[in-house]
Image (cartoon, grey):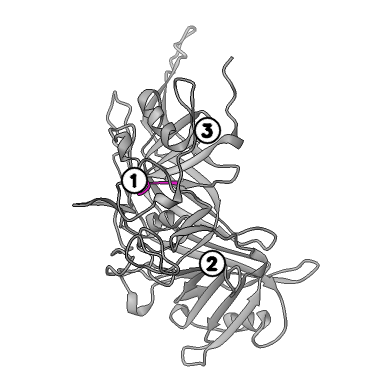
Amino acid sequence: MASLNLQRNSEVFMSTKDIINGADAVDLRPTNTWKLEVLAGFAMTSSAATQDITSLESGTSPDRSQQRFNTAINPVDWNFQVYLRPTGVNTGAAGNGTTAATNQTGNVKPVADWFMWQSLVSNTKVVATDADGLHERSVWQSGGKLQTTTQAKGTGSSATRSNFSTAVENHLYFKLDNVIYQVSNATVNSASVDAGIEEIATTTWSGFGTTMKELTGSARDVAISVFGGTLNSGSSVTANSNFQTMSATATQSAAYHPYNQMNVAGSASTNSFIKNRLSAIEFHHKATAGGSDEKFVFPVTSLSFDYNNNITYLTPEELAALNEPIGQFTGSRAVTGSATMYLRSGDLESAGFLRNISEDSRTSSAQTSNANLIIGGTTAPYVAFQLDACQFEFPTIGVEDVISLTVNFVAQETTANKGDGGEVTIFAAKS
């Protein structure tokens, strides 16, 4: 009897290489394959659009049949949750160096899933091919900073822009114990950061792909040789991950980037967890357009941040064919958040903030308001989301044992960046 496949033994990887459609085993290298340490509850779903044809006739013996057709393959839905873990790689430098806060690739990579954030906000793929081979390309900037605007190339940082019509496509590999599925042409649609105070900071990633297929035969062996596991022959292969080999060149043997460790200044460094209980928020809001800036700093009971590309797919509708998606387009970029805190009296406390918002007669106050979500507190490790133009909704009061206040907000482009993005700047630091 075949053995069961357990979620506990499952793993998820992202790669720029498509094994099914022709990538060679030698193309799976440290510069193009990353592991994601996912939490329980990940999913990938492939479904089909259907059409039912029914008949309805009169008479004592009518044709009452029904036929169902699969007309199109819907885009694959996938999602998983990972811990938000700063790495300490906050400075760009020449490759293979040992300068403080640098990585052997020379790229700035301040969080373990830096490549996912880049795929979410940038048109720059995380790997490029040039005359010297394959190289990583991070758009994070020195200081551990990621901006959602057009940026020129810098030291350890590639050029990027956030206004793009189609999202970058990579490939996700779901290793479900001994069965491996490839989600081809995977796009990152959204990220949701949850900072509930009783938890460790996490990011929930979700997106789409064009097809989901099981790896079999030689393609499966190629994947197992990199991810580790049981080959088709029945023999076992140890997971091939070595942070020390992640240099600036692509001449290393097949391996994948680990999630919990990073090569920092030439040696192993364990990526930090973020304790949400230390998180805080800082709101700035003017009661009137000509008023003075008022700063509100609160401890929170819950905090969230969401970034959504609103990606949609085009699928043909040809008769007598099982149609597949042929392309995707990004929609309006939505950057939102929510915070809940206790209701406290005082001009610069939560009651004063509620009064400020409710008495503001302007229809839009975003250009004179901003928010900084500091997940993990002001002392590293933390990840902060700076929203330089922030429109606050009217806060709502929650009547419980302790009276609370909840406010939702939307990040907008600043006047200086109109048409170029810039809704959020992300900062990451490790202790």
Q: Please tell me how crowded label 1 is: few (under 14), some (14-19), or many (20+) other residues with Cα within 10 Å.
A: some
Q: Please tell me how crowded label 2 is: few (under 14), some (14-19), or many (20+) other residues with Cα within 10 Å.
A: many
Mark number displayed over residue 430: 2
Q: Nearer the viewer, residue 76 or 90?
A: 90
Inspect the magenta stretch and tell me whether residue 31 lies in it.
yes
Q: What whole-number distance in Å separates the C-alpha atoms at marks 2 and 1?
A: 28 Å
Point out the residue furthest to the top here. 61
Q: Please, what is the three-letter code of the amino acid marked with disc 3?
A: Leu
Secondary element under disc 2, as helix, strand or loop, is loop
* Residue at point 30%, 68% (across, down): 150
| Marks 3 and 1, the one that precedes in the sequence | 3
Secondary element under disc 3, as helix, strand or loop, is strand
* Residue at point 48%, 38% (across, down): 239
Mark 3 vs mark 2, foreground winner is: 2
Which image quadrant is residue 373 in? Answer: bottom right
* Residue at point 27%, 67% (across, down): 153
Mark 3 vs mark 1, foreground winner is: 1
> Magenta residues: mostly which secondary structure?
loop
Give percent across and percent down for residue 281. 59, 74
Determine whether 182 is above or below 134 in the image.
above
Q: State the extent of the magenta-drawn residues as a range.
A: 29-34
| Marks 3 and 2, the one that precedes in the sequence | 3
Whether residues under marks 2 and 1 lie with C-beta atoms below 8 angstroms apart, the answer is no
Mark number displayed over residue 176: 3
Which image quadrant is residue 355 in? Answer: bottom right
